[in-house]
Every structure is written in structure tokens, then in C-alpha cells.
């Protein structure tokens, strides 16, 4: 091989890594979580073992910290309407502390959930609970898929109240459409009660979402789902409407509150 040919080969080997780094087809890395607040209205028009309906307003917030490598999520349910023999008011406060880990095109959320007995009477568990949480989301073009799961077990509380031991699994499937619209599965939070040794919630539902083109920091969705498990004192049908405001952060849904907590 001539000296000139060696120079061509050396130049090719030198620029090949650079061209790979600049390849526009390289998979994008997930965006860090955003700071968000949201309000969700949850209407249950019928129950499986009693007459009447209920309405719950879920207030949520998500706050990243430590350069967005961790995120705290907060949820407070407020019962605004209930069947005749039930009470209304604030429910138990739930807090998640989650580590954000990027893995290729996907993103893991790993950490713990904490439940505080801030509710009165039958609106809460009257127990302090703690347990592990884990979630994963990946976005491939217009399709977002993943799940979020958490388990929580009572550790402190009056012995006169029953213990708490539950696992909740919420799959995520969403497909973005033109004009800021999206369709996908509803919250669908499958719940297993380890004390009852049964699935108490086996939902099946559908969601339609909209992100206003004139204000990208807002998004909303409307969903309806049916609980296929025959469990006393649980809703049959549930209709939800949510409005979320993204205060700061990228406009990528990969790590936002879209996982059914």
C-alpha cells in the first residue's frame, strides 16, 4: 500500500468516530423531570355494593432537586362528595422520593413512597406507611410506553385500625397525534391488597389528552375506566379530568406525572 493510500485510511479512521457522534439518527436521551402542579377531578357515579356517587379532587405537585437527578412527588386527595353514609374532607397525604436514572432512550424512577394519616375518620387509613417505588418510561417517536409501581405497608398507627399492605401497578401507553392531541390508556392503577389476598382494582379504560398549541406549559386529559374486580365499597365506573401546569423544565413528557399515581 502506498504512503498516499495509508494517509487516506488514517483520515477515514480518524473522522469515523466524529461522524458517529454527529449522527442525527442517534437516539435522543430523555429530558430531566419538570416542575409541575396539577388538579384532577375524579367522579365515580356508581359503587359496586352501595348506592350513591362520589367526587375526589386530587392535588399533585412534582419538584426536581439535586440538578434534576432526584424528584419529589406529592399527592393530596380531597373528597368533595360521597355516598350518604360516608364523610367528606381531605385524605391521606402521599409523598414519593425518586432517583432519576437515564438508560438509553428510557428513564427509570427508583425510590420510596411515604403515606401520612392526614385524613379523618374513614377517609384514610390512620396509619403511617412506607414502601418501595419503581417506574420506567420510554418515548419512541409519538409513542410513550412504561409503567409505575409502588408498594406500601403500615409501620405505625393505632392497633384498633386494620393494617395496610398494598401494591399498585399503573401501565402507561400514550400516542401523540397532530394538533396537540393524544390518546392512550387511562390511569388504570391495578391494586393488590395483601391483607385481603385479592385484587381490589382491575381497571380498564381510555384517555384522550390535549396540549393547547397557544400555551405549551399546559396540558389536560379526560378519561373513563371500569373496575372489573367485584370489590365492596369500590367504584364501578370512574371519570377523570386533569389540568396540569408545567412551571419549569423541558416540554418532554418522559418523566412527568403521567403514570397513574
Image (cartoon, rainbow, N blue to C red):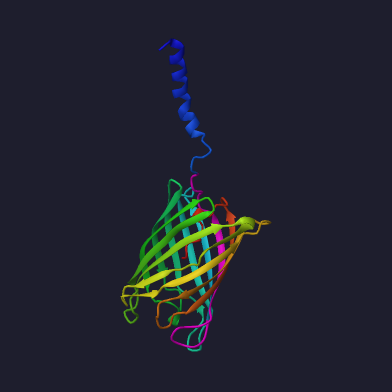
Quarter location, residue 202: bottom left
Q: Position of residue 171 (x, y in %)?
A: 44, 63
Report the front residue among 179 and 191. 179
Quarter location, residue 128: bottom left
Residue 222 in sight:
yes
Q: Residue at x 48, y 33 (%)?
A: 20
- 37 inside magenta stretch: yes
Main SS class of the magenta portion in the image: loop
Q: Position of residue 60 (x, y in %)?
A: 52, 65
* Residue 20 in the image: above or below residue 138: above
Q: Residue at x 50, y 61 (%)?
A: 258
Residue 243 in sight:
no
Q: Position of residue 256 (x, y in %)?
A: 51, 57
Q: State the quadrant of the N terminus.
A: top left
Report the front residue among 218 and 227. 227
Magenta region: 28-53
Q: Residue furthest right?
A: 214
Quarter location, residue 192: bottom left
Q: Residue furthest top?
A: 2
Q: Residue at x 44, y 57 (%)?
A: 146
Report the front residue among 140 and 158. 140
- 196 inside magenta stretch: no
Q: Position of residue 25 (x, y in %)?
A: 51, 40
Amino acid at each position: 500500500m502506498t504512503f498516499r493510500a495509508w494517509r487516506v485510511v488514517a483520515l477515514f479512521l480518524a473522522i469515523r468516530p466524529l461522524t458517529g457522534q454527529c449522527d442525527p439518527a442517534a437516539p435522543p436521551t430523555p429530558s430531566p423531570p419538570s416542575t409541575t402542579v396539577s388538579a384532577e377531578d375524579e367522579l365515580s357515579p356508581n359503587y359496586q355494593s352501595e348506592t350513591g356517587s362520589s367526587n375526589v379532587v386530587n392535588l399533585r405537585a412534582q419538584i426536581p432537586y439535586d440538578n434534576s437527578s432526584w424528584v419529589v412527588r406529592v399527592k393530596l386527595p380531597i373528597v368533595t362528595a360521597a355516598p350518604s353514609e360516608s364523610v367528606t374532607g381531605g385524605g391521606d397525604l402521599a409523598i414519593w422520593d425518586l432517583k432519576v436514572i437515564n438508560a438509553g432512550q428510557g428513564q427509570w424512577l427508583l425510590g420510596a413512597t411515604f403515606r401520612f394519616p392526614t385524613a379523618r375518620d374513614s377517609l384514610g387509613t390512620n396509619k403511617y406507611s412506607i414502601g418501595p417505588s419503581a417506574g420506567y418510561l420510554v418515548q419512541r417517536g409519538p409513542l410513550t410506553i412504561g409503567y409505575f409501581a409502588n408498594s406500601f405497608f403500615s409501620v405505625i398507627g393505632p392497633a384498633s385500625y386494620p393494617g395496610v399492605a398494598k401494591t399498585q401497578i399503573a401501565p402507561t401507553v400514550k400516542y401523540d397525534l397532530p394538533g396537540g392531541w393524544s390518546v392512550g390508556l387511562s390511569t388504570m392503577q391495578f391494586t393488590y391488597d395483601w391483607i385481603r389476598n385479592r385484587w381490589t382494582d382491575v381497571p380498564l379504560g381510555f384517555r384522550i389528552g390535549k396540549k393547547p398549541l397557544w400555551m405549551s406549559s399546559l396540558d389536560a386529559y379526560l378519561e373513563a375506566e371500569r373496575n372489573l374486580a367485584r370489590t365492596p365499597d369500590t367504584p364501578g365506573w370512574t371519570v377523570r379530568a386533569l389540568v396540569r401546569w408545567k412551571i419549569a423544565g423541558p416540554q418532554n413528557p418522559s418523566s412527568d406525572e403521567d403514570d397513574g399515581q
